[in-house]
Amino acid sequence: MVQLQGLLAAATVLDILDIVVVAYFLYRLHLMMKNTRAATLAKGLLVLLVFMVICRYLNLHVISWLLEKSMTVILVALPVVFQPELRRALEQIGRGKLFHKTSELDEQEFEDMLDSVAHATKIMSKNKVGALMVFERSTGLEDRIETGVAVDGIVSSGLIQNIFVKDTPLHDGAVIIRGTRIIAACCLLPLTENRNLSQELGTRHRAAIGLSEQSDAIVLVVSEETGAVSIARNGELMRYLTVDDVKEILRNSIFRPNMTDKTSFMDTMKSFLGGDKK
């Protein structure tokens, strides 16, 4: 207690500023990593580090030695494992976006976007026009956007239908939607490596599942063969959905009311360290 009082008495304004800057940087870093594969990997590394400290304290020499060697290998592999996140972070720093607040969705604009997507999906399903629409969430999809053609247009039923008209330049690939705007079209998606899927699933469905395995994006698929509507989320495929099902899933998965986003710094740090307990 006396040492703590001594540290507080010796602290200067610069020391406090130093702590605040580091804490804010870690907070922004957490927001960027939240709900991505990097966050899960970081938690795993933290668990290994704590376990290694406990083994050292208990003088478990063999386990400590194995963990130390494992940590060395992991640290060398980190740049490879976190390559997409590191690249996105450096790009955001270069564009000055790392410390900018993410824009919030307007509820009415979001509902208009849902209506446009639902209307286009209904018509394409009826006419058996194949479509692949990706709805970006927390995980950035810049690496996928770069494989396509920039659009940056407001989502509308007509625009979506025109993009996916057969034999047009942009129909073969995915549309990526961020908020209420179509960012890019004709984007390439990774195929899933899951071999237990039904043989009747085509390339669009496998690409949708593949992206949903690697990110938290919601991927909407319209089958060209049957007109069936499906949604891929978290590596799972929900098939034979109605337009109302699509709107409900997208509304619950993407839209966040303004009050929900206003999380305190301490709540966010608790979530990072302990996970969401619901």
Image: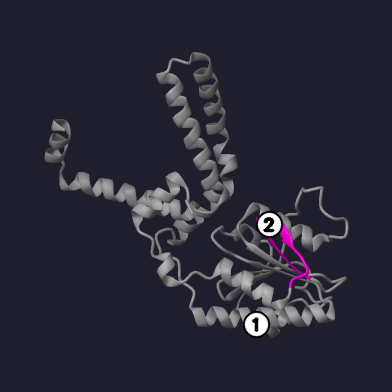
Q: Main secondary structure of the magenta part?
A: strand
The residue stretch that appears in magenta: 229-241
Rendered location of residue 40, percent (x, y): 54, 45
Residue 191 figure quarter: bottom right
Image-based side of 184 in relation to 198, left or right: left
Q: Residue at x 70, y 83 (%)?
A: 119
In the displayed structure, would residue 85 be above or below residue 242?
Answer: above
Q: Residue at x 63, y 82 (%)?
A: 115
Q: Which residue is disc 1 drawn over?
A: 116
Residue type at numbered disc 1: Ser
| Residue at which label 2 appears | 211
Residue at image position (65%, 52%) is 214
Measured along the vertical axis of the image, is residue 146 above or below residue 130? above
Numbered disc total: 2
Q: Is residue 239 magenta?
A: yes
Circle 2: residue type = Leu
Say if residue 136 shows up in the picture. Answer: yes
